[in-house]
Image (cartoon, rainbow, N blue to C red):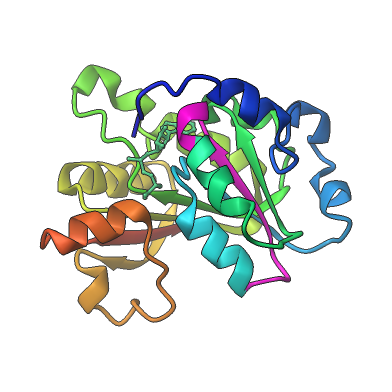
Amino acid sequence: MRLRNISGSREIVAQDEHVIQEPEQYKGKWNNLFQNNNPIHVEIGMGKGKFIMQLAQRNPNINYIGIEKYSSVLLRALEKRREVELNNLFFIRFDAEYLNNIFDTEEISRIYLNFSDPWPKDRHAKRRLTSREFLSKYNLCLKQEGEVIFKTDNRMLFDFSVEEAKETGWKLRNVTYDLHNSEFVEGNVMTEYEEKFSAMGNPIHQMIAYR
Ligand code: SAM
């Protein structure tokens, strides 16, 4: 999702109290920011933030960090964020390419990837957030028992992701090609894209990868 470049969005995002401006300085110390030792769950490519905000409201004993590459998109999440009182949710405007600059070894318990950009051309496969290149970044910062939860309606991206995970030694569970009609649907929180694509009749695929 790349919204129209909204004038001033970068400045607004740079001043918002819920956005961590220099995330590198928290590497290995994220729990200091939250002032507790609760598990940290991260959503990469959070878009307008509905999913992570709902999870943060539901689970006060989990610390949430939403990562989004573009200010113009993050701005939308901030508008909603201001309406809720939460001390377990922060955002970062950041390219996940550099994830290991901001999270230390075994610092995170869970990574959510929701409706990640498909990058359909083969030559762009490395940019997919479920490519082996990204999986190895997740491998470094996830705790031993950590996991990656991925949802998409894009069958090509899903099949690619299952293959990449298997070929790089990840185990898979709760794999489904139709999440909303599966036994795994209980507790599912819909993202903005999930609402849009399932309303169009697209089945939602899900996998959970762990080591
Ligand atoms: N997760 C949301 C949902 O399901 O409604 C948004 C999905 S949208 C298709 C993908 C989002 O991921 C976009 O907002 C995009 O800017 C963001 N994104 C893509 N690559 C990223 C990266 N390398 N680091 C951080 N965010 C990224």
Q: Name the residue located 75 percent from the left edge and 40 percent from the top edge.
A: 17
Q: Is residue 89 above or below residue 103?
A: below
Q: Can I make out residue 203 in this image?
A: no
Q: Nearer the viewer, residue 126 or 3?
A: 3
Q: Name the residue located 35 percent from the left edge and 77 percent from the top edge.
A: 184
Taking the magenta stretch, the answer to whether it contains residue 70 is: yes
Q: Nearer the viewer, residue 121 or 81?
A: 81
Residue 44 as seen in the image, left or right of residue 39: left
Q: Residue 116, position in %: x, y?
A: 35, 41
Q: Residue 63, position in %: x, y?
A: 71, 59
Quadrant housing the N terminus:
top left
Residue 6 as seen in the image, left or right of residue 110: left
Taking the magenta stretch, the answer to whether it contains residue 54 is: no
Q: Can I make out residue 9 in this image?
A: yes
Q: How many marks?
A: 0
Most extreme residue toward the left is 201
* Rendering quadrant holding ligand 1: top left
Give the magenta range.
Answer: 59-73
Q: Is residue 79 above or below residue 205?
A: above
Residue 209 as seen in the image, left or right of residue 16: left
Q: Nearer the viewer, residue 59 or 183?
A: 59
Q: Residue 96, position in %: x, y?
A: 53, 31
Q: Nearer the viewer, residue 51 or 122?
A: 51
Q: Residue 77, position in %: x, y?
A: 52, 46
Residue 76 as seen in the image, left or right of residue 64: left
Q: Is residue 180 above or below residue 193?
A: below
Q: Name the residue located 82 percent from the left edge and 29 percent from the top edge.
A: 25
Q: Quadrant of residue 121?
A: top left
Q: Quadrant of residue 129?
A: top left
Q: Name the residue located 20 percent from the left edge and 55 percent from the top edge.
A: 197
